[in-house]
Amino acid sequence: MNKRYAGLAVSVGLLLLAGCTQLKQLTGREESVNYKSTVAGDPLSIPPDLTQANQDTHYKAPEGTATFSQYAKSQAANKSVSPSDAILPATSGIQVMRDGDIRWLSVDKPAQTVYPKIVDFWGEQGFTIHSQDPKAGLIQTDWAENRAKIPEGWIRSALGGILDQVFDSGERDRFRTRVERVNGKTEVYVSHEHMVETPTADGTTFKWIYGKDDPGLDAAMLARMMVFLGTDVKKAQEMVAQAEKDPSQPRVVQAAGNQAQVSLSEPFDRAWRRVGVAIDAAGFSVSDRDRSSGDYFVRYLDTDTGQKIDQGNFLTRMFGGKNTAEATSFRIHVAQQGAGSVVTVLDKNGQQDTSPTAQRIITVLTSHMK
């Protein structure tokens, strides 16, 4: 009898879960983005300088107030702050900017305030941080799977955690955020790389290849970032959707021959932004940047030289082995030229580089310019 009731309870539970899923789909409440990192992060630890709450004056009751009436009188003096403003107050000073398909946030706060909040944002979205460089203003996540792309059904809803170990969307994304100081404000750029699992030619196995980036996904993450920073959900969606697109598209012309340069029909400010987004989208390793001189400092490993590159084992990497893979330092230089701008590649000594590697760098950049 107990087994019969247990089976009946499980069946009812499955039906209820299925009903909940259908209800979410009918009401449009189903999330389209739900990331789960494929890399486990370090467990949270309490910073050594974190004091106990009862020792912090912020958590102590105000002295001199003994009764509720006295407390009410003390609060009446500050009628300008409503209860709704005291709970998750909306943050002003955030704008959505747009240039072509590029969207970014302009935040009226210093970079040292915005940067750690962006790090926290990616953790909340289900990502682990692969690398961060406060000096360069860069944050890159590890690859993560968008679980919302897995077909939703009542069986998966019912067994959730069990089937999550079996189902896979076959797609991965990782995001790069660039934080930059511009004219007293902080600009935040988001770009992503997309990979898709595809079968090999013989059909015996699968391999991961780069897929097409989705500008709409970057825009969705910007909207979520605005909400995390304090903007109302509906307002954030409207601001991202209504960001005006500049009707004038720049002309991007790559020089012929061995010039290793590209010309843009737009002034330095816009060209600097466009090149920065292209560097992010292409996945270049950026060590620093200097807007005043127009230089992005990158490291690039050229795999198309025809020379065999040996990754080496642990001992050769530790003690130095022959012909091991090593990235080379370059500068991607943006300079005003008349009414437009020109982008060139400089070597580590600051001299223009026209080598085949420099030409490939320009080709990669040009292919990612939006």
Image (cartoon, rainbow, N blue to C red):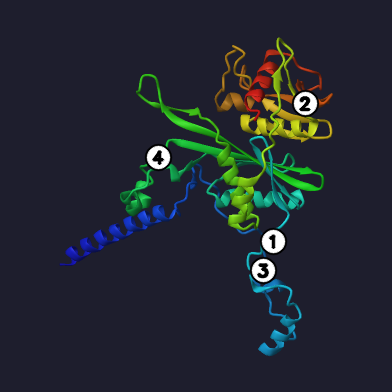
Q: Earlier in the sequence, mark 2 or mark 4?
A: 4
Q: Earlier in the sequence, mark 1 or mark 4?
A: 1
Q: Amino acid at mark 1?
A: Asp
Check disc 2: other Cα within 10 Å, few if <14, some if 14-19, many if 20+: many
Residue carrying label 2? 333
Q: Judging from the image, what secondary structure is the residue with disc 4 in?
A: loop
Q: Which mark is residue 168?
A: 4
Q: Amino acid at mark 4?
A: Asp
Separation (CA) of disc 3 from disc 2: 46 Å
- Mark 3 or 2: in front is 3
Separation (CA) of disc 2 from disc 4: 42 Å
**Is 5 or 152 nearer to us in this picture?**
152
Check disc 4: other Cα within 10 Å, few if <14, some if 14-19, many if 20+: some
Q: Judging from the image, what secondary structure is the residue with disc 2 in?
A: strand
Separation (CA) of disc 4 from disc 3: 43 Å
Residue carrying label 3? 85
Percent position (x, y) of residue 26? 39, 54
Residue carrying label 1? 49
Position of the N terminus, as image quadrant, is: bottom left
Percent position (x, y) of residue 50? 67, 63
- Residue at horizontal 78 percent and vertical 27 percent from the top: 334
The reply to whether discs 2 and 4 touch (Cβ–Cβ < 8 Å) is no
Q: Amino acid at mark 3?
A: Asp
